[in-house]
Structure formats: structure tokens, C-alpha cells
Amino acid sequence: MPRILSLLLCVLVLAASVSATDAAESYHPLVAAHRGASGYLPEHTLPSKAMAYAMGADYIEQDVVMTKDGKLVIMHDVLIDTTTDVAKKFPNRARKDGRYYACDFTLEEIRTLRVTERFDVKTGKPVFPDRFPDSPIAYQVPTLEEEFYQVQGLNKSTGRDVKVYVEVKEPAFFEAQGLDILKATIETMTRFGYKTAWKAGPSCRSSTMRP
């Protein structure tokens, strides 16, 4: 009897070990590309998002802000002076606090800006000096629609099913400026066929998938 019990115990331990190994091998953590491949190319640019897609991300993140004329563009902050040359191109358009806000510029104006690596507005020095160097490449601020077109286009051409992860930046701030950023974002996502699962907070996040 003791031998039988010992043998049974060994079988159970072996089965548990095999089960744990199978679970470990089947485990696949989901990867969300935060601001795209932001460690390699200027954040939230279309090339950065394309690189993140090519690197195998499961989700591509979009931080959404709104322009003066109600267009949805992709930037990490309501402030646009830490990743663009807005202070050089529009030196007289800062607010009283000395900062530049997305909602004070039309989409046409924002299209003229060159996106670079994030830098300190006081010193002008890059926040991450070992990342992509400053260059004359005219990276632009993309719209939310362009991001969706790119992800869905790549899904079609590659056969993958990469999803989007949308974060609306400071909706209360935009509401105070007379801009309904939440409504516009939901309408755009619906038009592109995305179902949403919102998580409320100072910024509103939505992990999404195609129907």
C-alpha cells in the first residue's frame, strides 16, 4: 500500500508539473505600444506607430486631444510645446502661463508643426538624450482618423488583428474650452467600427476591438 500511495503521489506531482509547463508555454502577455515605438522614433508619430506594429504590439495607443476647430489629433498632452516647434512658428500664441495648448490652434496650423523627441521647454534639451536625435525630418502630428486608417490598413495587409487603445486627455479641460472631445471621439470610433469599454478618470481610456 505505501508503494502504491508513493506511486500515486509521483503521478500527481508529474501531472501538475506538466500542466504548469503547458500553461507557461501558452501564456502570452498582451503588449500595448505606449505612444508607439517611442523609444526609437518621436512619440505618437505615424512612423513610430508603424514600427510598434511591426515589432509585434497587440495594441497601439492613441492619446487624443482636440484642436480649436474641433479636430481630434494625437498628442500625449493638452500642451504641444514639449514635442513640437510651435514656440518658434507661433511665438505670440502662448497663453499667460507661457505655454501652448492644442485647443488654441486649428488643425491646419498644427499640420505645420514639426514633431521631435520630447524636450524640456525651459532648457530646450531632450528629455531622453539617447533616443532619436534631432533632425530635419518633418514628422507631423497625426489625426485620430489617420491612426485608425493605418492600423486597419496594416491589419488587412498583414492578416493580423492589432487593436487600438484610446485615451482621451483631460476631457474636463476641453469641456471648459467649449469642446466636446468625448462625443467626437466616440463618434469617430463608432464610424470606424470600434466597440468601446470606457474607464473613467481625469483622462478617459478605452480598450477596443473590432465587432
Image (cartoon, rainbow, N blue to C red):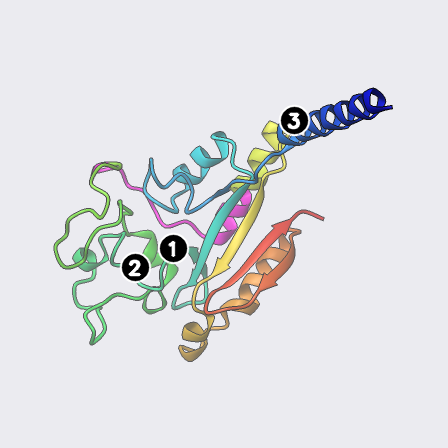
Proximity of marks 1 and 2: CB atoms separated by less than 8 Å: yes
Residue at 78 percent across and 23 percent down: it is: 6
Residue at 32 percent across and 69 percent down: it is: 104
Of marks 3 and 1, the one in the foreground: 3
Residue type, numbered disc 2 = Ile
Identify the mark nearer the N-term, 3 or 1: 3
Residue at 12 percent across and 55 percent down: it is: 123
At which x and y percent is residue 142?
41, 49
Residue at 35 percent across and 60 percent down: it is: 77
From the image, give the main secondary structure of the stretch colored magenta: loop
Identify the mark nearer the N-term, 1 or 2: 1
| Mark 3 to mark 2 CA distance (whole Å) | 48 Å
The residue tagged 3 is 21
The N terminus: image quadrant: top right
76 within the magenta span: no
> Crowding at label 1, few (<14), some or many (≥20) Cα neighbours within 10 Å?
many
Identify the mark nearer the N-term, 3 or 2: 3
Find the residue positioned furthest to the left: 123
Q: Which mark is residue 80?
A: 2
| Mark 3 to mark 1 CA distance (whole Å) | 42 Å
The residue tagged 1 is 75
At which x and y percent is residue 170?
43, 68
In the image, is residue 179 above or below residue 144?
Answer: below
Of marks 3 and 2, the one in the foreground: 3
* SS at badge 1: loop
Numbered range of the magenta stretch: 133-149
